Image (cartoon, grey):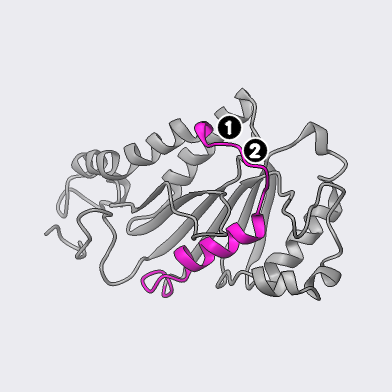
Amino acid sequence: MRFGARDTDRDTGCPKDRYDSVTVALIDLTDPVNAVQAAALRNALHKIRNDVPRYGRLEIYPLNPTTEKAIEPLFAGCSPGSGRDIDSSLYGNPELADRLWQKQFANKVDAVAADIRKLPTQDSSPLFEGLQSVAVTALGAPLAAPASDKRVIVVSDMIHHTADLSMYQGAPAFERFKATQYYLRIKPMLRGANVDVLLIVRETRRNVQQPPLYRFWVEFAAASDGYLRNWEPLQ
């Protein structure tokens, strides 16, 4: 075992005692994206990959309905650390660390990023249910609970659309929505996570992607024990 290394799972590379951080990416491609947006999404996933610290957990999910089962990740694993995590050659080999990081972690994330546009489109965009699902499976897992750094990245147009509620005509006032039975059923527990939104701009929905939509999600995240930290276009 390398100096300072921890006992890790052979398949995922994750520590067996706890994850140091948890990063969750929820990708909403229920509507298609254009070629430029697809390239921006790949770049975003590469940056997310690079930002995961040593022994940090990364899970990438597609936005799918949750009527029959929780959403399953396209990727789930931990960064083994790269050469930047090696203080000196006395305690490790930075070049070897980089090769292991590439083979055991980066290449697997890159394979998902390369195929992400192939996700099938859907008739609905169940963002509430998707957030609830990943909050349970990724943030609520026993090894994830002690992590001091939790991050949820949502790549979406942020326009929830299901039979229970559609935002196609605009977001409702959050206080009114909070009083519904639907909200009580889908409210996620984000467990103190920072939420970063990479907004897929829809030319046909510019009337919806306005400040009231942003305010709704700020209040939704806060009521879910989260904090909407960033809201920026995917580019």
**Closest to the observer: 123 or 106?**
123
Number of numbered callouts drawn? 2
User: In the rendered structure, does residue 143 fall within the stretch colored magenta?
Assistant: yes
| Secondary structure of residue under mark 1 | helix
User: In the rendered structure, does residue 141 fall within the stretch colored magenta?
Assistant: yes
Q: Is residue 191 above or below residue 32?
A: below
Residue lying at 36% horizontally and 66% vertically, measured from the top left: 19
The picture places residue 168, in percent across and down from the top left corner, at 82, 47
Which amino acid, mark 2?
A: Leu
Q: Which residue is mark 1?
A: 40
Q: What's drawn in magenta, residue-wise?
A: 117-146
Residue lying at 29% horizontally and 60% vertically, measured from the top left: 14
User: Is residue 186 found left or right of 80 in the rendered image?
Assistant: right
The picture places residue 102, in percent across and down from the top left corner, at 29, 39
Residue lying at 26% horizontally and 55% vertically, measured from the top left: 13
Q: Which mark is residue 234?
A: 2
Q: For the C terminus, give its image quadrant.
A: top right
